[in-house]
Structures are given as structure tokens and as C-alpha cells.
Amino acid sequence: MSKLENAVPGYRYLVVEPYTPNIGATIHDIDLAQLSDASLRAELRKALAEYQVLFFRKQNLTPEQQIEVAKVFGDPDKAKAFFPRHDRHSVIEVLEAKPTGHRYGTDQWHADITFSANPPTGTVLYSHVIPPAGGDTLWASATAVYDSLPKHLQLYLEELEAVHSFEHSGWPQYFAQLADGDAIYRKARAEHLPVVHPVIQTHPVTGKKIVYVNPNFTDRIKGLSRQQSDALLAFIFAQFQRPEFQARLRWEANTVAIWDNRATVHYATADYDNQHRLLHRVTFGEDRTF
Ligand code: SIN
């Protein structure tokens, strides 16, 4: 293990360099294909809880090894979105933007799959092809957002619940581009009825409070009029825009990002017209997310 000037103490097996003061860390000198050591796996879980998103450069993972990485944190066979799947491993979602192909609506702040009753607790995203410039991903800390709110607003939000649905995300538009899009849309609607989540959640590992709404999937706050709900949600969503709460990753091929999907929201920048971008995603979860 090499010495790194910015490495934080408290880790025996990992070299952890904070990425910003509020969110993110780069983990150095690790080969994610070699994770058999239980102490190392435990430190990875500790780092994810502490930093919310972890970055690993220069990794070489087979699809099987990426799935093993996800298993360090949870069960990779839980909630999935509507992305095409890997031909040999259905738990791997293939996120591919070809120069003249479909685009996904991931350029909106969201936590993955909050339109399901038990959304993933986290995600392992591994880059294969990255445009020469652009296609960065940003994460925002939803615990830092909660902490920044005035006490009386925190207390008010804790009484509220919100409805989440895939309906007003980019998915219906994506389905419309597909030859069998109507049938896929009808099936998605039948299988994914809107769900209700508390607006404020408590992280089961860290005990931190989380603002658990996002513009991609949160439709409305229950008990408020549409106007009131839109205005309150717009106020909360605006907090994700604060650079102080964000980490922005400039991808290279063979980078892995692992995020805590309970404590963060993320945004995939769509600024790479006519360029190829290909990543493999493995979400992981538990029987109960909270
Ligand atoms: C996602 O929303 O999970 C994808 C993020 C990305 O493509 O960078």
C-alpha cells in the first residue's frame, strides 16, 4: 500500500482520499477484482457509509467480477430499471449512448429506482467507453441537504410523504423511441404502480437524516395541493444544485463509481452529442431499503 499525503486515518486496508468536504472519496491502490479479504470488504462498506460515493480508477473487471463487487454491499438481484441487460448476466444493466442511438433521461437529479417500493441501497457503475470530453456524472449529498435546512423546515418535512412514479421521468419518452415501445410502456405501468415514501428518511447504517425526494421520480407531496407540492419540491430540488453538496466525476474508461443510493442523488451530464458512452451498472439492495 503506498503512502498518500491526503489519505485519511482510520482505515487499515484502504487508502482513502476525500474528494470534497461533503461527499465523495477516491480509493487508491486497490484492485476490485481481489476482494476476498473480509476486513477489506468491511472497510469498503465503512467508506461507502462515510463518503456516500467512492471512485476507483484503472480497474479491470470482468462482468462476473463487477457482480462480486456489488455483493460486497448487498444483493445484486434486487430492483432494476428498464435499461437493456447484459446478454449473459441479467443483473447487469447496459447503459449505452451510441452516436446515433437512444438517449436515456438520466440527466435529471435522481436516486435509482425510487419508483419502486424497495429501491436499491446502492449502485456499482463501471465505465467501458467514455467520450473524449463530457458525460461527467454528479452526485449530491441528500444528508448534507437535510443538514442545511432550518430546524422548523426539517420538522415540517418529517411529517410528509411523497408519491414516486417513473411516469414523468425520461422513461416514457425512451419507450416511445422503441419499435415495441407501446407494449413495453403498458407492461411498465402495470408492474410499477406509484409508490409512497416518507420525504425524510433515516439512514439505517449512519443514522443520518436524508431528504428522500428527487425531480426524476417524485410526482407530488401527499396532502398538499398541486401548486403547493410543486413549489415545495422545487425548493428542495434547488438545494441539490449547490456545488458545496456535490462531487463531479470526470470519467475515464475503467473507472468504477460506487454510490449509496439512499444518501445521494446523481445526474448524468448529457453534453456529449454524437459520442459513444458505455457503462455497465449493477444496482444492489436489501429486502427493506429503510
Ligand atoms: C445512472 O443514473 O445510474 C447512470 C449514471 C450515468 O450514466 O453516469
Image: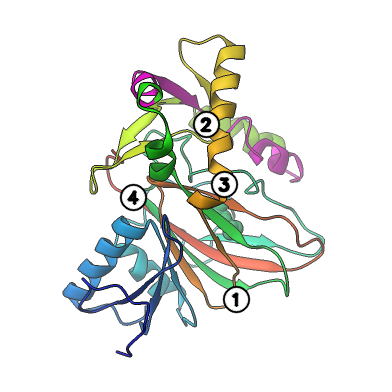
**Res. 82 mark:** 3
Look at the image and tell me in which quarter the N terminus lies: bottom left
Question: Would residue 47 appear left or right of 219 to someone viewing this image?
Answer: left
Q: Residue 165 magenta-drawn?
A: yes
Residue at image mark 4: 285
* Residue located at (29% from left, 60% from top): 73
**Is residue 217 something that shows in the picture?**
no
Q: Nearer the viewer, mark 3 or mark 1?
A: 1
Question: Would residue 13 appear left or right of 169 to someone viewing this image?
Answer: left
Q: Amino acid at mark 2?
A: Ile
Q: Amino acid at mark 4?
A: Gly
Q: Secondary structure at mark 4?
A: loop
**Chosen colour scheme:** rainbow
Mark 4 / mark 1, whichever is N-terminal:
1
**Res. 78 mark:** none
The residue nearer to you, when weighing 112 against 190, is 112
**Res. 252 mark:** 1
Q: CA distance from mark 4 to mark 3?
A: 17 Å
* Residue located at (52% from left, 36% from top): 214
Q: Amino acid at mark 3?
A: Phe
Q: CA distance from mark 1 to mark 2?
A: 32 Å
Residue at image mark 2: 236
Tell me, yes or no, whether the two marked residues, 4 and 3, touch with CB atoms within 8 Å.
no
- Badge 1: how crowded within 10 Å, few (<14), some, or many (20+)? some
Q: CA distance from mark 3 to mark 1?
A: 25 Å
Q: Residue 87: x and y, percent? A: 54, 65
The residue nearer to you, when weighing 240 against 254, is 240
Mark 3 / mark 1, whichever is N-terminal:
3
